[in-house]
Amino acid sequence: MSGFKQPDLSERQQAAAKAKKAALEKFRAKAADPALADRLTARAVGAADRKAVKNAREIEKADKKAREIERAQQAERDAAVQRERAKAENAERERALEAERKAARDARYAARKSRSKRR
């Protein structure tokens, strides 16, 4: 058994329609409010400012990264030049040492030859 319903279907539908109409009027009143337009404008301006600051930060960050990369590349080039210079100095030192050894060896050989000629 369904029982007696108070209010009936049509009354409930009318109440729902009135509630919808009241909600729509409330929304329209808020949308027409000039203060809302001012708040939305201020919000949009604030968002634009934040975006500009963010873009400036990103540009600065990219510039900083580019400078760091350039410094790293320059340091690598300097290190390569230093390695080449050290390699050349070592080679020159080795040639001078080899020349000294050869001179000492030649002197020993000449001394041995002169000793054998004296006999």
Image: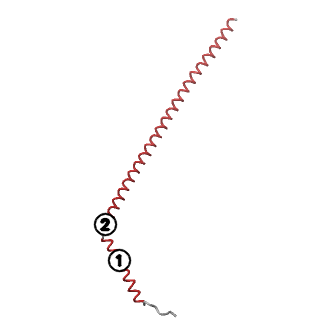
Residue drawn at (56%, 24%), measured in percent from left and top?
93
Q: Amino acid at mark 1?
A: Leu
Q: Quadrant of the C terminus?
A: top right
Color style of the picture: secondary structure
Residue drawn at (60%, 16%), measured in percent from left and top?
103
> Label 1: how many residues lie within 10 Å, few (<14), some (14-19) or many (20+)?
few
In front here: 92 or 46?
46
Task: Please state the horizontal and vertical placement of residue 30, each as a whole percent of the image.
Answer: 33, 71
Which residue corresponds to mark 1? 24
Which image quarter: residue 44?
Answer: bottom left
**Distance between mark 2 and mark 1 Cα atoms:** 18 Å
Task: Please state the horizontal and vertical placement of residue 18, each as a whole percent of the image.
Answer: 36, 83
Mark 2 element type: helix
Task: Please state the horizontal and vertical placement of residue 88, each as a whole percent of the image.
Answer: 53, 28
> Would you say 109 lies left or right of 44 here?
right
User: Is 104 situated above or below 1?
Assistant: above
